[in-house]
Each structure stands twice: as structure tokens, then as C-alpha cells.
Image (cartoon, grey):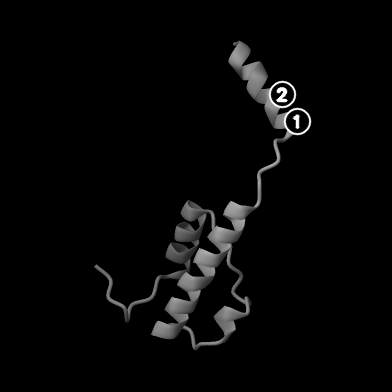
Amino acid sequence: MRTREQVLTPQEDRAVRMVHGLGVRADAPLARLAPEGTELADELLLLEVQLARQARARVPRIPSPAKSKIVRALRRR
């Protein structure tokens, strides 16, 4: 189990972001406020991830006509 002092490797960080569908830039405003690897940096990253998730939840998904056509074709099989 990791303690607060330990930091995810870049590969682990990328995997966690991919699993959760998150793409926070390293040069994002909050990420630049604290030195990397500090508790404050971790908390800011968590806050930024939560805000990105909330913003994405507010945006309605627009159905793609091409995707709908593919799904209909696959259902007919």
C-alpha cells in the first residue's frame, strides 16, 4: 500500500487517468502552484480531476450519426 509520501510513476499516473477518462494537462493552472510530489500538489491534482469530471458530466453528449448507423447495422446481424 502506498503512503502519502509516495508518488505514482508517470506510467501509473497515465494508466489511472486513462481508466477514469481524465486528461489533466501537466501545465494546467493548478498543477503549477505546488512543487511536484508534495501533499499540496496531490490535493490540487485531485481537485482538478474532480472539477474536470464535473465539467464533463454537465456537457450533454451529442449522438453521432455515423456511430448510430454502425450500431443499427450490428443489431440487425
Compared with residue 70, is residue 47 higher up or lower down, i.e. above or below?
A: below
Using the numbered discs, state the Cα–Cα distance from disc 1 to disc 2 in whole angstroms: 6 Å
Compared with residue 49, is residue 57 higher up or lower down, i.e. above or below?
A: above
Image coordinates of residue 35 in percent, x first then y, are: 49, 88
Q: Residue, x 31% and y 78% (percent of image)?
A: 4
Check disc 1 and report the residue beneath it.
65
Check disc 2 and report the residue beneath it.
69
**Circle 2: residue type:** Lys
Disc 2 on helix, strand or loop?
helix
Q: Residue, x 43% and y 77% (percent of image)?
A: 42
For the N terminus, the quadrant is bottom left
Is 67 placed left or right of 32 in the picture?
right
Contact between labelled residues 2 and 1, with CB atoms less than 8 Å apart: yes
**Circle 1: residue type:** Pro
Res 16 label = none
Image coordinates of residue 13 in percent, x first then y, are: 46, 65
Is 38 placed left or right of 66 in the picture?
left
Q: Nearer the viewer, residue 20 or 58?
A: 58
